[in-house]
Image: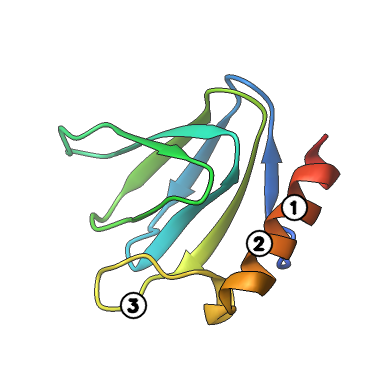
Amino acid sequence: MNLELDLGGICLKPKQVLKVRSGVGHAIVCDSGALWVTQYRDQRDVVLEAGESFALDRDGLALVQALEPSAITIAPATNGRASPPAALPRYARTVSRLAHRQACG
């Protein structure tokens, strides 16, 4: 299966899981809702809320589970830190999140 994402990102229903394989070097950005993120052989459990992000730093499988209806974007990370998609200015990111939240219901 091949997936192509646009800036609109992905909508997840509560308890829905997204599997990210070989995602090291990318960031999970929580545009709305709340997410639980864990990576293969990593004892950390990360919870993200709207506006937060987490840079994937391990090879292998990462799981992203929605704790409530959520909108996410997967973006390149820079210097090991999560960066907003396309380094959008703050105002543009806010507008994008609002539009994404409305699209996800």
Residue 85 position within the rendered picture, expressed as x and y whole percent measured from the top left: 56, 71
Q: Which residue is mark 2?
A: 94
Q: Which residue is mark 1?
A: 98
Q: Amino acid at mark 1?
A: Leu
Q: Amino acid at mark 3?
A: Thr
**71 and 96: which one is in front?**
96
Q: Which of the two discs, 1 and 3, sits closer to the camera?
A: 1
Residue 83 position within the rendered picture, expressed as x and y whole percent measured from the top left: 42, 70
Q: Amino acid at mark 2?
A: Thr
Q: Which residue is mark 3?
A: 78
Give SS at disc 1: helix
Res. 5 visible in picture: no
Residue 9 position within the rendered picture, expressed as x and y whole percent measured from the top left: 68, 56
- Asked whether, in this view, residue 44 is left or right of residue 14, the answer is left
- Asked whether, in this view, residue 22 is left or right of residue 44, the answer is right
At 23% from the left and 54% from the top, the residue drawn is 58
Quadrant of the rendered image containing residue 5: bottom right
**Does the CB distance between marks 2 and 1 fall below 8 Å?**
yes
Which is more N-terminal, label 3 or label 2? 3
